[in-house]
Amino acid sequence: MPKKGKGKKGGKGKKGKKKNDDNPLKMDARNTILWESRLNIADTSRKHCREVVGTLAGDNETLRDQLRQTEKDTIDV
């Protein structure tokens, strides 16, 4: 027994033409620019993190020295 059809509804529509940009030199140039920008971002981020770590290490040392001095003062009293 054949299936009952529901009739035709709206189609999928027309698909646009795919842009054919297969020039390998252009793709290489784009990829080079992309990777250079990624490298620059990674370098700046790494430099920033190193600066922050240095600052935190200095602050930590200062706090440690203050704590030792406070403990000495407390013991002396």
Image: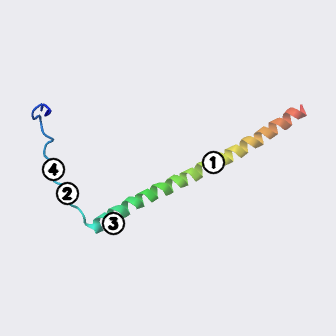
Kindly give the residue lying farthest to the front in the view shown: 1
Q: Residue 54, percent across and down?
A: 63, 51
Q: Which residue is mark 3?
A: 28
Locate residue 35, reporting x and y percent.
41, 60
Residue where numbered disc 1 is placed: 55
> Which residue lies at the image location 12% right of the left edge and 36% below the top edge?
10
| Residue 21 place in picture, x, y as percent | 23, 61
Q: Earlier in the sequence, mark 3 or mark 4?
A: 4
Whole-Å distance between the Cαs marked 2 and 3?
18 Å
Q: Can you identify the residue that label 4 sits on? A: 16
* Amino acid found under the numbered disc labelled 1: Thr
Mark whose residue sits in front, 4 or 1: 4
Foreground disc of the pair 3, 1: 3
Vertical position of residue 24 compared to residue 57: above or below: below
Does dot 2 land on a helix, a strand or a loop?
loop
Drawn side of residue 10 relative to residue 34, left or right: left
